[in-house]
Image (cartoon, rainbow, N blue to C red):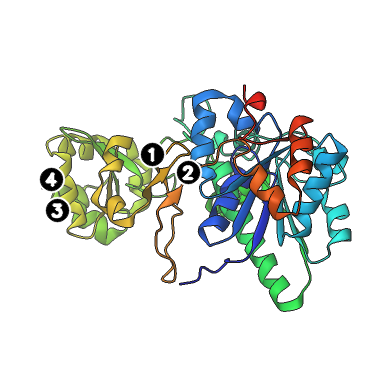
Amino acid sequence: MTAPLTGVRVVDFGQFIAAPAATQILVDLGADVIKVEPVHGESARQIGLYGEAIIRNYNRNKRAIAIDLKDQRGRSVAWDLIAGADIVVQNLRPGVLDSFGLGPDTVRAAYPGIVYATVTGFGSHGPSKSRAGLDIAAQAESGIMSVTGEADGEPQRVGFPVVDAAAAHVFAQAILGAYVRRLRTGEGDTVETSLLEVAVHLQGPNWGEYFLTGNEPTRKGNGQPTVAPAADVMPTSDGSIVVSAYSAVHFTRLCRLIGRPELATDPRFTDNVLRVRHRPELLAELRATFATFTTDDAMALLTGNGVVAGRISSYREVRTNPDVEAAGIFIDATDAHGIEYPTLASPWHLGSIDRPSTTGAPELGAHTEELLVELGYSEAQIDELVDGEVVRALRCPALIP
């Protein structure tokens, strides 16, 4: 079956996570994504194991070309790529592609049908428009860190680059919307999002409550501030679970299931307002009881009777979770040396697309020669570009450090 974006070409100038992860979604929908890197490689290739993990997870099935955009000949190659593209994506430091004459205004003036998409750290209109932006800065300045952590502890970041990851999905969604419009009208578009905007938007419920009350959300650890028990951790005899049962029906059911029916009629806990007021006492009672259960027994008891609970799992446990396995989110990719390694698939399913075996992230310049040939460059022209270090191609050992 034909994938939705079969025949769509994307030129991806992205680095690190937000843009490459967005174009990874487009790859999985069938697009031909050409990853454009400097001849020395994108920034993620320069930071060791963490960078390698980023490259592997967000560049599957892409074709890679390495170009020196500081050289006019390299910019000519970039323009040749853009000429055949439907979508251009970038998240380079603000102003970099503009300085090469490859910014959105210039590109869309030349090719009005192109969708040109940019993700920045802080947006392109405010006083911080020229600042480089990373996930951690967006977590800090959006309020996420102010509400993450224990009440008496310091602000905490979320334990993974949540804003980068969320921005990738938002970015891909907006790109697809602009592309659908192009299919209907023939007109291209300019797409923008920023890590800061996404980070603020992720906190919708908190903002809604703040707008209603004017009260600043604060750090309260795992529990939710206005309902109890909710998102509260219950240590078991061999692990921990998280439990939410704050409606009257579910709280009464929880108490009955764990053999503590008297808690439902305890004057401290008879309604949600009282349970929130007396949360420390409530948690002490519940945790003392859950400590007598194994995790498996607690999960079977609660989830089998409609009470929301989740096993707090290590990565090793997630890897073997039968629901995760059934979803197929972990897949095997094959690197340039024929070695398989596990990586992540996109977290959705379309009936028209099978989960394919996948080519791993390309090595730097892996498809430079192939793409130049497609663009009509002769062997002599390619040799000249390689010898002049305007492009990097794997066939040329002299350029491989």
Residue 121 in picture, x, y percent from top left: 70, 40
Mark 2 or 4: in front is 2
* Circle 1/circle 2 CB separation < 8 Å: yes
- Mark 3 vs mark 2: which is more N-terminal? 3
Q: Secondary structure at mark 1?
A: strand
Q: Amino acid at mark 4?
A: Asp
Q: Earlier in the sequence, mark 1 or mark 4?
A: 4
Q: Which residue is at 54% across, 44% downward?
A: 59
Q: Position of residue 340 (x, y in %)?
A: 37, 40
Which type of secondary structure does the marked residue at label 2 adopt? Answer: loop
Task: Between residue 286 and residue 124, name the one nearer to us.
Answer: 124
Tell me the residue that label 4 is attached to.
Answer: 297
Residue 327: image quadrant is bottom left
Q: Which mark is residue 360?
A: 2
Q: Taking the image as drawn, is residue 314 in sight?
A: no
Q: Which one is in front in this view, the residue at disc 3 or the one at disc 1? A: 1
CA gap between label 2 and label 4 equals 40 Å
Circle nearer the N terminus (4, 3): 3
3 and 2 marks in contact (CB < 8 Å): no
- Residue 341 is labelled as 1
Q: Secondary structure at mark 4?
A: helix
What residue would you read off at disc 3?
256
Tell me the amino acid under the disc marked 2: Gly
Image quarter of residue 384: top right
Q: Amino acid at mark 3?
A: Arg
* Placement of the C terminus among the 4 image quadrants: top right
Residue closest to the eye, 271 or 74: 74
Disc 3 and disc 1: Cα gap in Å? 47 Å
